[in-house]
Amino acid sequence: MELFEAMYTLRSMRRLKPDPIPDEQIRTILDAAIRAASGGNQQSWAFIVVRDRAVKDEIAAIYLEGWRALKASGYGQAPPDAPEEERRRQGRVLRSAEHLAEHLADAPVWIFPCARIGSQPPTLTSGSSIYPAVQNLMLAARALGIGTTLTTIYRRENARVSALLGLPEGWDTAALIPLGYPEGKWGTAARQPVETVTYGERFGQPFFGPTADSD
Ligand SMILES: Cc1cc2nc3c(=O)[nH]c(=O)nc-3n(C[C@H](O)[C@H](O)[C@H](O)COP(=O)(O)O)c2cc1C
């Protein structure tokens, strides 16, 4: 698959089929993940592939509880005075997040990218060495037609999840990524236009000139 097509259509796929993913594809995905950059090329990462239903059920229960608490707090809900289109879009995201929360354990494969963080609390710099690998992993899965979602809600009970995964001291998980063949179709993710988030030389100063469309 062409790289730009993979990047533009890589989005959270939360409705997944339970069909198994061949080991060879899991290897391809992880072999792409470890091509990523890391600070000082330390490669202080590890990837835990989870398929055991009992472990998945236990962590999925933690996730579901976390999701319900988040939802009850109003998280992700568009304000009532938001435009109709935005309310509809947020409604779709919430329904798909709810679906994943309720069916997380049915995803055939989970991957926990883990980072060695040592004894100091991670900073934005030290903690970010895992995310290029996470993005590579998700792009490689996309290229193989396998859906993913980067999730973190389980972290509200992080110590319990780390214990279930047998994580040694000084290691932490960065995400839980459920993988599976998607039920739905791939589509381009909606994002703020690049012009609105790009500045020239100084924050707040437009970089891109007016385009024919915006004239
Ligand atoms: C750091 C991070 C944490 C996230 N945690 C969750 C999560 O716990 N559950 C979930 O369903 N999606 C999670 N997401 C996915 C985002 O909700 C999603 O990327 C965003 O809504 C954009 O939607 P799209 O990927 O479909 O374009 C997370 C994404 C990031 C980058």
Image (cartoon, rainbow, N blue to C red):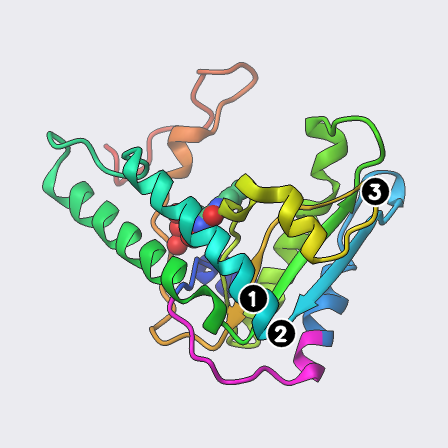
In screen coordinates, is 123 left or right of 40? left
User: Sequence-wise, which precedes: disc 1 or disc 2?
Assistant: 2
Residue toward you, 103 or 86 = 103
Which quadrant does the N terminus fall into?
Answer: bottom right
Distance in Å between CA atoms under marks 1 and 2: 7 Å
Tell whether position 208 is magenta: no
Instruction: From the image, tell me which residue sits under label 1.
Output: 56
Distance in Å between CA atoms under marks 2 and 3: 23 Å
Q: Residues within 10 Å of mark 3 (few under 14, many from 20)?
A: few
Whole-percent x, y for residue 176 in the image:
58, 55
User: Which corner quadrant of the image does residue 85 belong to?
Assistant: top left
Q: Residue at x 71, y 51 (%)?
A: 163
Question: What amino acid is labelled 1 in the image?
Answer: Lys
- Ligand 1 within 8 Å, label 3 CB: no
Q: Residue at x 40, y 33 (%)?
A: 195
Instruction: From the image, tell me which residue sits under label 2.
Output: 51
Count the marks: 3
Query: What numbered label is drawn on residue 215?
Result: none
Question: What amino acid is labelled 2 in the image?
Answer: Arg
Compared with 51, 138 (above or below) is above
Q: Residue at x 50, y 74 (%)?
A: 180
Compared with 83, 62 (above or below) is below
Residue 208 visible here: no
